[in-house]
Image (cartoon, helix red, strand yellow):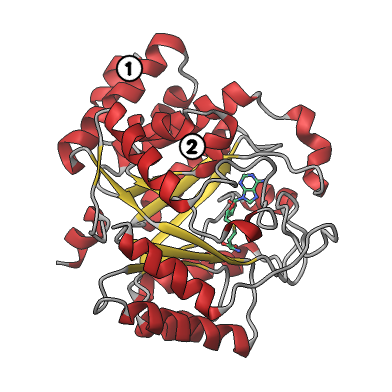
């Protein structure tokens, strides 16, 4: 079957996905263009913002790719104060961002759990609950997820990182702390509780094949998630996985592969929310625009106070680390208009797929 014929299909099978993942040049352009068309038809040209608050880089895990892994002793550890978080949230509200996303290294101790509950409640108090709240705080117990949901968080991001168990254990230590099946169970628990649940993977990992990537996309569809985040893997020199940095696809290839993943998923799940990850912009100055033009519809501008940002380097040379939030605001608005999109201010920007399913 030709690329053109595959792009007309209603339901993509694994072989179709693999074909689309291997397109280049004009055929790849056809795919990206089709995904944009589908997005504009189903979701219009809106881009939703989530003000990102990187709450803490203290982490109990040691993921082999991540710069803030607990075993990286070069990192200075920090946790924002509650007042700092609330200030960030107020700023998000003032800038019209509509939602905040709190992300952090993974901690499970009761003090942490309680602190997040308090923060969620306090953010909900800003202008009578006008801010949407996304959490991205790793693996937690069902009870903790429930407690945060009841406090007012309504979206949760937990990337599976690799939906293939074998690959998962090539990029994580194989021990008690890093358990593929527990991560899967966490995603199920989030879906059950009623969160708008997001997952995702890194693209261009060492050992990752096109077959793996096709399975990742099928996994998202099978789980029927509301949101997906996919970005290029960026080797961090202070991590064990860095030793394979010469075995991964080039920057250009990783960017293209990410765009194809986004575009194919837009065809498979036309109404989910998909983020144009900051990692895209880190490897390509126009990476976020390209991701939006390939079917993504969410951007997460960083609101973390500038003095902490250098310590939340999950990967090196992260984009926008020195930008002030106000600069980011204007910059994004202009960048989105330049590609024919508009930011929808003062709205939660929920996943349309999720909202329809709930009805
Ligand atoms: N502790 C939270 C948040 C992790 S950071 C959790 O476990 O969900 C958010 C995402 O950054 C991760 O899910 C991972 O996919 C991505 N990430 C981490 N290191 C990266 C790297 N070196 N290159 C690209 N993305 C990376």
**Circle 1 SS class:** helix
Check the image and report above or below for 335 versus 133.
above
- Is 132 on the left-hand or right-hand side of 82? left
Residue 24 image position (x, y, % from top left): 47, 14
Q: Which residue is drawn at the image coordinates 26% and 61% (left, top)?
A: 348
Check the image and report above or below for 77 versus 38.
below
Q: Is residue 12 at all visible to an observer of this figure?
A: no
Q: Earlier in the sequence, mark 2 or mark 1?
A: 1
- Is 107 on the left-hand or right-hand side of 347? right
Residue 109 image position (x, y, % from top left): 65, 85
Q: Nearer the viewer, mark 2 or mark 1?
A: 1
Image quadrant in which the N terminus is located: top left
Q: Which residue is drawn at the image coordinates 61% and 89% (left, top)?
A: 110
User: Pointer 2: what residue?
Assistant: 214
How far separated are the C-alphas under marks 2 and 1? 19 Å
* Residue closest to the far top: 26
Which mark is drawn over residue 30? 1
Image quadrant in which the C terminus is located: bottom left
Residue 70 image position (x, y, % from top left): 77, 65
Q: Which residue is drawn at the image coordinates 76% and 28% (left, top)?
A: 247
């Amino acid at each position: 079957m030709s690329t053109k014929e595959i792009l007309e299909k209603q339901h993509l099978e694994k072989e179709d996905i693999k074909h689309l993942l291997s397109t280049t040049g004009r055929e790849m352009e056809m795919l990206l263009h089709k995904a944009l068309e589908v997005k504009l038809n189903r979701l219009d040209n809106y881009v939703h913002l989530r003000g990102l608050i990187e709450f803490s880089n203290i982490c109990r895990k040691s993921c082999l790719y991540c710069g803030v892994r607990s075993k990286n002793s070069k990192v200075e550890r920090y946790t924002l104060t509650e007042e700092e978080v609330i200030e960030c949230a107020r700023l998000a509200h003032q800038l019209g961002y509509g939602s905040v996303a709190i992300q952090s290294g993974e901690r499970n101790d009761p003090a942490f759990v309680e602190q997040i509950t308090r923060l969620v409640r306090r953010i909900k108090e800003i202008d009578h609950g006008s801010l949407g709240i996304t959490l991205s705080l790793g693996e937690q117990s069902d009870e903790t997820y429930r407690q945060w949901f009841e406090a007012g968080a309504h979206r949760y991001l937990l990337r599976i990182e690799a939906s293939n168990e074998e690959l998962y254990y090539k990029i994580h230590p194989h021990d008690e702390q890093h358990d593929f099946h527990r991560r899967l169970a966490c995603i199920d628990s989030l879906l059950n509780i009623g969160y708008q649940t997001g997952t995702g993977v890194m693209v261009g990992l060492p050992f990752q094949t096109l077959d793996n990537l096709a399975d990742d996309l099928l996994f998202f569809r099978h789980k029927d998630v509301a949101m997906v985040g996919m970005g290029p893997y960026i080797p961090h020199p202070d991590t064990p996985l860095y030793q394979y940095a010469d075995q991964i696809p080039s920057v250009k290839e990783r960017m293209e592969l990410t765009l194809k993943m986004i575009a194919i998923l837009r065809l498979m799940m036309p109404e989910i929310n998909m983020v144009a990850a900051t990692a895209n912009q880190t490897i390509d100055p126009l990476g976020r625009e390209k991701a939006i033009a390939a079917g993504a519809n969410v951007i997460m501008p960083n609101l973390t106070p500038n003095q902490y940002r250098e310590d939340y380097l999950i990967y090196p040379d992260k984009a926008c680390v020195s930008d002030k939030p106000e600069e980011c605001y204007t910059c994004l608005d202009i960048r989105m208009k330049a590609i024919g999109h508009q930011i929808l201010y003062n709205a939660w920007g929920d996943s349309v797929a999720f909202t329809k399913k709930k009805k």
